[in-house]
Image: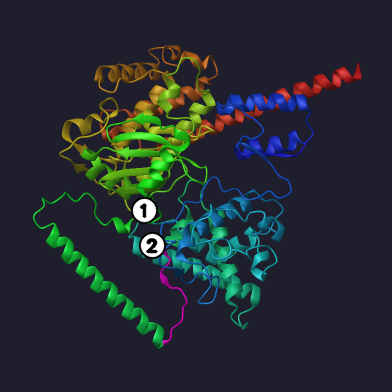
Amino acid sequence: MSPIIVQFHSSLTKILVASLATTTSHISQLLNALSSLVWGTKSNNNSSSFYCIGAGTCVLNFTTYPYVKFGECGSVQENITNWGGEYGFPTTICCRNALTVLSEAMASHARRSIFNAPLFITQDQWQNCSNLFHPQQGMSQHSCGFDDIYLGSTKCSYLTLPVVKAKKEYQDALDKCGHFDQSFDQACANCTSAILSLRDSLYEQENGKESNDNKTERAMCGVAALVALAAGKLPDDPSISDKFLRCMPTSGGKSGSSLSKLMFNVLIAVVVILVIVILVKYIYVSNKKKPKKPVYLKQITTWSGLYWFSKAEIENALNYGNEKVCLGRGSAGQVYRGVLPSGQVVAIKHLIKSNTSDSFTREVEGLSRLRHPNLVSLFGCCIENDERYLVYEFCANGNLAQHLMRRDRHLTWVTRVRILRDCSFALKYLHHHIEGCVVHRDIKLSNILLTENYQAKLSDFGLAKMMGMEESKVFTDVRGTIGYMDPEYMSNAKLTCASDVYSFGIVVLQILSGQKVIELDLDVRDQLTRKARDVSMGKRPISDFEDPRINGEINKVDFEAILHIAVLCVAKSSKSRPTIEVVYEELSKVYNDTISRMVLMLSRIEFEIESSTTSRQCS
């Protein structure tokens, strides 16, 4: 049997990879069955939870930080300065997301490597990773300067993680790039300076202080520095490489600088301006007597990283296969299933016109700045003929409410714990965003989407608000879903980060009990919270609260720990609630304990099967 890498948890990976290499086919079938129990989904040979390493397979994992298309690739080509110097890698700003994806994937590979393996992979392995991001107009692996990022191309390509970590500049860069709670400009300056100092130190170490300046070599040292820093960061920190590359200034790409070309460009610009002035005057005169239309959008040109779909592209995606499939309906609009020309399945939200001004602008502006594995990705949008569409990644398993409330099947205990851990991870990212605390305002079961592998992703940012970490705001429009809303927010309209914590606490109680909170009935919600407090205080048994469909899968200690943190989250006073960091840490501990028990169970079953097989052979 070929060796299998299980994308699970580090402790589970080490044990299963060693054991599965010598396991019989019967044991493999049993482990696959147990895997489906753990993940809450059926396992098969094509499952993305497992993949085999073989010839032609990329050894880098791009699932945690997937590539997101960058909207500026079809326009001005600007170089990222300082990456390798003026004549370093010809990397343009449209490759910025690809640089982040690449550095994070290489960092993940470096963390998993043993025996102090180099940060870079071999040339053959690198060629197998040529499709690390989806094809996009204006960029490719060659145009982004990634052809020679492999072991043996330069002296810095032989660097290992321990060697880089030993540099004093490494810790300085790690510290400065981990503190973006100050002003963004100052944090950028400190982070950029520290990383470039580490790059230059590595260059001098490998090439000597007196060596001629080799721009390509210096650029490779920069890549090594960035990969090592990403590998050394805390797992739940936002991407260091993403922060660093966002801070990078840009300069125009190299082009002819002759006077004739300059004059030609100036002449073209003058002609274009004259044409625009004439058109504007014509439109103004022709529409002077018409009633003015409301302006829905502000500064739409500032939204970057998004693909702008035409109405025709949206219609083709919606009617793929001559069938229009509605995935759901909400106050902001309807969501449909769509298929792009590449075959990629997406979710397309058609916003209701009455909500266009607020919801569309807020959601696009918010999601264009947010990126996290547990937030649904926004691929692009469409603005045409008063129609507004948003195009999201498609989550094959729908929303959490559909699974939790169905009686014909149920989510396993491990899957429920992982969903809670993932959601708290996403909220931690939102509440500690570098631009301020992002309050979601509508955390509920139907806004938690599940991928094919039951990874949880928060969605629907139509009500989201940005504010300072310790700030509270009073709003005239108290909006959200009543059954999940913070009582303080409902009574005095004061919104804080703790408002999301309360809503998440209601979600936790529903996942533990399997009971639905009727969205417009506060009595049902209050009954659920009172029962949870009684069980947490020992006044009622756990069996009165746990979802009977779990059928004894839970561990009592883990259940009580999650219930306790949920009861704290739904405290009526926001000052009595824990921060989302505390919630995430507690849920992570429970998840790790649950996985450890699953590892022991799998090992015990494997041992018993091997012992039984040996006994039969001896007899």
Q: Which mark is first along the chain, 1 or 2?
A: 2
Name which residue type carries label 2.
Ala
Q: Which residue is mark 2?
A: 187
Q: Nearer the viewer, residue 139 or 108?
A: 139
As helix, strand or loop, the secondary structure at mark 2 comes to: helix
Residue farthest bottom in this picture: 259
Q: Which residues are magenta?
A: 247-258
Q: Which residue is mark 1?
A: 434
Whether residue 469 is visible: yes
Residue 165: x percent and y percent? 59, 60
Q: In the visual, does 585 lie left or right of 200?
A: left
Cα distance in 3D space between marks 2 and 1: 10 Å
Establish if 402 lies above or below 59. Answer: above
Residue farthest right in this picture: 619
| Image-quadrant location for residue 427 | top left
Whether residue 375 is visible: no
Q: Are marks 2 and 1 in contact (CB under 8 Å)?
A: yes
Residue 74: x percent and y percent? 43, 62
The prevailing secondary structure element of the residues shown in magenta is loop
